[in-house]
Image: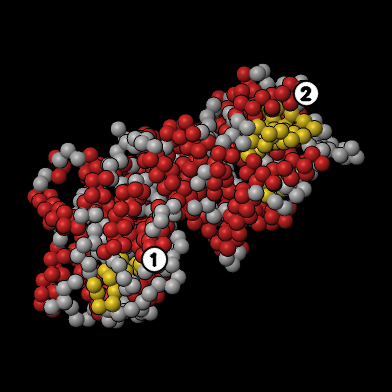
Amino acid sequence: MAVPTHRPVGKDVFFMMTCLCDAFYADVARAAVEILEHAGCRVHVPEDQTCCGQPPFNGGDFKTSREIARHTAKVFAGDWPIIVPSGSCAAMHFHGNSLQFEDESDREEMTALGNRTWELFDFLVHGLGLTKWEGKLEKRVAIHHACHTRGTKTGEAIKTLLGSVDGLELLDFGQGEQCCGFGGTFSVTFPTISAGMGTLKLDHVLAQQPDILVSADMSCLMHLSGLAEKQQRPILHQHAVQLLRAAMPSV
Amino acid sequence: MSQPVDTFAKQLKPATREAVIKSAALTTGQRVDILSRDFEDPDALRRLAGQIKQHTLENLDQYLEQTEASLTKAGAHVHFASDVASAREIILGILQEHEVKTVVKSKSMATEEIHLNPFLGQNGIESIETDLGEFIIQIDDDTPSHIVRPIIHKRREEVAESFEREGLGDYNTDPETITRRARVHLRSKYMNSGAGITGANFLSAESGRMVLVTNEGNARFSMAPNKVHIAVTGIEKIIPKDRDLSVFLNLLARSATAQQITVYTQFINGPRPADKPSGPEHMHVVLLDNGRSDVLASKCREILRCIRCGACQNVCPVYRQASGHGYRAVYGGPIGAVLSPLLAGKESFGKFADLPKASSLCGACREVCPVDIPIPDLLLRHRERAKSEGIPSPGSPPMEPFGSLATSPALWKTSMRASKALNHLPLGLMPIKPLQDWLAVRTLPKWQGGDFRAWLKKRGKEAGDVE
């Protein structure tokens, strides 16, 4: 995954809530905004934002996906960095769009959009330069690294910040490089394989008996937690940013 | 209707799946260990290998000519086979010319591609696989399910049963005993054969030098007692220079089996020179196109960099669940999901258009590929092609309605709020296929549509800063 190298950093930032947080995880989006503000940012959340276009893109419907991506580019017009609490949606901006716009006349505009996009933790650590999160949280935490953050600095950034929280213990588990099995529509078109993959992931995670499972992508967690609950072995799960929020001294 | 690969996975015996997962996961781990132990920056090496291969592909016409000239100069006969039928006819012709009744074969995916063994059988020529895994596949009338571990789907108990059935000794599951029995059985086959057929791992355009790697030495055995050697290889196996081997040989075994180098690495410089005591007097190289020129002209040409190591299969979570046989073709796993629809030809693309969907696009294959093939991107290109060509995809919801919603913010926001009703509906009873497929194995979190926006608004009013 080619992550843009010279992305803007500034006090004013756009926040892209992602469709999943819009629909299911308001608390995650809230925590992300509060963390960014706590880190000194002025957070702007354009009302007309919808989705990054990934669902049709993954389905091969580039035409539909491009229309959504163009809408997104319009909504987030300007120079501010765009912060996304999802490695997957961020990767759509800087990688997916490069693929589906390769023969399009507005390719440059989409490249520009990608060049302003940061996954939240990547931004906190490599954009804002945070290496220590002041706070305390007595928890044993398993981090699931979402596949769309492969080759990016997000994984390392999550470890840095969560690892710096007093009392927080990071756990390793087996076959961490393996996908959880979500994969968007893959989760419903390949239900057996998707569930098989998720079950293996849960086996590895639960073997370490974590207090909580976190990730930079709620999509993986939605799948894994839903699977765990159905299998009657529910697991506490949150976006990694919610742990930073929970660790903050005064709420 | 469900996706064929998923259906296959559902019906796969748990013991088979377990065998595949165990072996694939073990090799994946060992591969990482050996590469990071031996090289400071293995990714740089992978990128370099990818660049060399890409360069070769982009100048393949020129390198093919050079390879032909070098091989001819070395004394080999070069044949170009445009498709399966011509490859078979060329090979049959050579064997008939030398009145060969029995051939011994070392492992070759190219010969799998042209289904050589049954064809030779129909023409009265016995073809015996000498790689242990392929030998077991052959006596079981099975097909390989992995590029370098053809019997990854078999447990040793099954192998013991097969050997007993074939009269190769009493039931015995000890791997060393099985290997020894196969070795004894195959020795006489080598000695009584009339030709040896091999693949080729690399072919140097500069020198015509052919490189063959094995762990069992069976390629050497296949050649040593025979007058005729036929090597069948895809045109993409060419590399520009001998020195490039230093890159590829360092990557191939480590990626494939987590070995520094295979037990045998043969450098074949043509047929036996007159002053040497043994070796084939006749060397034939069959350069197989079989759709590769079309691939080269397509947007998926990077797939031709593949050196057939199987690392993408080992690391692939879908392959681990479905096994190689789930992919219904010679090549399974990520490489197969890209290659099979292409090799099927333009008219038959649709027959394999479901394979590129059998991926969560997790990108693990891309990370391990020794020639840096962007496999997920190629899977996406295939999906786009399938969509453009209107090939139906079972279970995939059409995305146009979602597109309309996601480009109409007012409608989007209304739907977000309105869908809260979902929380009060008996979801399990709603006749929406994707929803049912989700709920069959998972629960769904509570709908919070619009809550974040509402929070922002409320807070904005308090703070007077609404965007």
Q: Is residue B52 visible?
A: yes
Residue nearer the viewer, B318 or B95: B95
Image location of residue A72, percent across then percent down: 29, 60
Q: Name the residue that disc number 2 marks.
A: B98
**Badge 1: few (under 14), some or many (20 or more) residues near its Cα, within 10 Å?**
some
Q: Which residue is drawn at 13% across and 66% down?
A: B454
Q: Which amino acid does label 1 sit on?
A: Ala
Front label number (1 vs 2): 1
Residue nearer the viewer, B1 or B250: B1
Which label sits on residue B116?
Answer: none
Q: Based on the displayed image, in which of its 4 quarters is residue A128 positioned?
A: bottom left
The image shows a total of numbered marks equal to 2
Q: Is residue B134 visible?
A: no
Which label sits on residue A112?
Answer: 1
Residue A240 lies, with reference to residue B28, above or below; the image says below
Residue A20 located left or right of residue B276: left
Residue A30 lies, with reference to residue A227, above or below; the image says below
**Badge 2: few (under 14), some or many (20 or more) residues near its Cα, within 10 Å?**
some
Per the image, label 1 sits on a secondary structure element best described as helix
Q: Which residue is drawn at 16% across and 73% down?
A: B466
Q: Which residue is drawn at 11% across and 71% down?
A: B458
Q: How far apart are marks 1 and 2 (CA)?
A: 65 Å
Residue at the farthest front position: A105
Residue B355 located left or right of residue A31: right
Per the image, label 2 sits on a secondary structure element best described as loop
Q: Which residue is drawn at 58% across and 58% down?
A: B46
Image location of residue A105, percent across then percent down: 41, 56
Image location of residue A199, percent across then percent down: 33, 49
